[in-house]
Amino acid sequence: MSTARKLRLGPLPSSGSTKLTFTCPASLKADLDAYAALHAQAYGEAVDAVTLIPHMLEAFMAGDRGFRKGSGNKAAPPKPG
C-alpha cells in the first residue's frame, strides 16, 4: 500500500532555464535522489535530482525572509556595501 506524502516541493511548473554546474557531497546527491523518488511517487511523474534542484533552490530563496527583505525583488540579490 502506497501512502501519498505531501512534500514541500509540489508539482513542477515548466519554465525557461539556464545551465549551471555545481559540485556537492555524495551524501547530498543520495538525499536528492531519494527526494526525487518520493516526488515521483507523490505526483506520479518521474523526475531526477537535476530537474528538482532549481525548483528546490527557488522555493528556498522564496522562503528566506532575510533575502526577500534585502533584495527589493525576488530576482536580484542585495548589493554589497
Image (tube, rainbow, N blue to C red):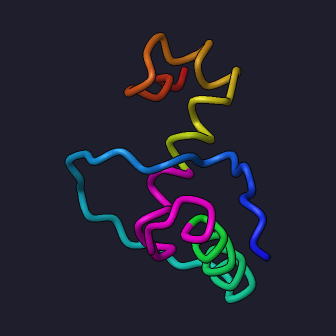
Is residue 53 located in the magenta-colored stretch of the structure?
A: yes
Quadrant where the C terminus is found in the figure: top right
Front residue of 29 and 68: 29
- State which quarter of the image contains the N terminus: bottom right
Q: Position of residue 25 (x, y in %)?
A: 68, 83
Residue furthest front as drawn: 1
Up the image or down, 9 lies above or below 52; here it is above
Q: Quadrant of residue 29?
A: bottom right
Tell me what residue is drawn at x 20 percent, y 48 percent. Answer: 16
Q: Residue 67: x percent and y percent?
A: 61, 25
Relative side of 77 to 37, left or right: left
**Residue 46 magenta-drawn?**
yes
Tell me which residue sits at (50%, 66%) in the image.
44
As drawn, 21 above or below 61: below
**For residue 18, above or below residue 39:** above
- Residue 8 lies left or right of residue 16; in this view the side is right
* Residue 7 location (% of width, % of height): 70, 51
Please name the residue shown 51% across and 73% down the image: 49
Residues rendered magenta in the picture:
40-56
Corner quadrant of residue 31 = bottom right
Question: Picture quarter containing residue 45?
Answer: bottom left
The secondary structure that dominates the magenta segment is helix
Image coordinates for residue 58, horizontal then vertical, percent: 50, 42
Q: Closest to the observer: 19 or 79? A: 19
Q: Closer to the camera, 23 or 34?
A: 34
Residue drawn 58% across the image and 19% down it:
68
Q: How many marks?
A: 0
Q: Give the left or right position of residue 79, taking residue 62 as reference.
A: left
